[in-house]
Amino acid sequence: MRIPKSELKVHAARVLRRLLKLYPDAHCELDYRNPYELAVATILSAQCTDKRVNLVTPELFRRWPSPEALAAAPREEIERVIQSTGFFRNKAKSLSGFAAKVTDEHGGQVPAVMEQLVALPGIGRKTANVVLGNAFGINEGIVVDTHVQRLSKRLGLTKETDPVKVERALVTLFPRGRWTILSHLMIWHGRRVCDARKPRCGDCSLADICPSADKFLQ
């Protein structure tokens, strides 16, 4: 089953309604109390589970509760604290650079502007969308991680696989006010039902409107 282009918006609205009903409590699963903590947690989440990040950040934020404190921290100490998140040397370098630039150029306050965020070390568009949408309530774009990327294609919302192109396609299909929650809904469904290797289509409440369900149910 393929969704005709003329019916994509109707299909997208149906998908959104189903996901909202299925996951009424969907939210960012990284623990944070402010934009600084969310930015740091999101940088650490690259190639790492949110659960692991949430085990590491309490100690990190206890020792360095602000960008100023983190910018002054020895790189080796940061590496020791975040080692279990993987790629810890690169992440420590990004965190140091991020904290220093926020301190020096933004008075210790994480900016709420896309262009300023992506100019910070360790912050790409995806991370900037996470921070803007969740810490500031600004729907600047849609977070496209591996779950959103996978589900967007399986659900017939786009044939694109490049995250930038996937985001570009999704923002035309969903109302701006729903962009942040949409990514959470897709991530929750991807983690709980629509697994990368073995999607549980038989248990999926979207199976009857999913163009990929028949392929995986065979």
Image (cartoon, rainbow, N blue to C red):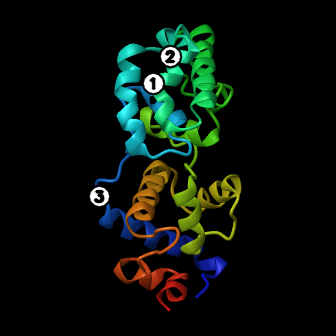
Per the model, the C-alpha gap separating discs 1 and 3 is 34 Å
Q: Amino acid at mark 2?
A: Glu
- List the residue tagged with mark 1: 81
Q: Are marks 3 and 2 in contact (CB under 8 Å)?
A: no
In terms of secondary structure, where does tag 1 sit?
A: helix
- Which tag is nearer the camera, tag 3 or tag 2? 2
Q: Local crowd at mark 1 within 10 Å, few (<14), some, or many (≥20)?
A: some
Q: Local crowd at mark 3 within 10 Å, few (<14), some, or many (≥20)?
A: few
> Residue 5 falls in which quadrant of the image?
bottom right
Q: Does residue 190 lie above or below 218 as drawn? A: above
Say whether residue 31 is visible: no
**Left or right, 146 with reference to 36:** right
Q: Quadrant of the N terminus?
A: bottom right
Give the mark nearer the N terminus: 3 vs 2: 3
Q: Local crowd at mark 2 within 10 Å, few (<14), some, or many (≥20)?
A: few
Q: Nearer the viewer, residue 84 or 181?
A: 84
The residue under the point 46% across, 75% down is: 199
Q: Does residue 81 lie above or below 200 as drawn? A: above
Q: Which mark is residue 77?
A: 2
Q: Are marks 1 and 3 in contact (CB under 8 Å)?
A: no
- Which tag is nearer the camera, tag 1 or tag 3? 1
Per the model, the C-alpha gap separating discs 3 and 2 is 40 Å
> Residue 123: x and y, percent?
62, 32
The residue under the point 58% across, 52% down is: 144
Q: Amino acid at mark 3?
A: Pro
Q: Does residue 100 lie above or below 26 as drawn? A: above
- List the residue tagged with mark 3: 24
> Residue 16: x and y, percent?
43, 65
Q: Are marks 1 and 2 in contact (CB under 8 Å)?
A: yes
Count how many numbered circles sit on residues in the image: 3
Q: Amino acid at mark 1?
A: Val
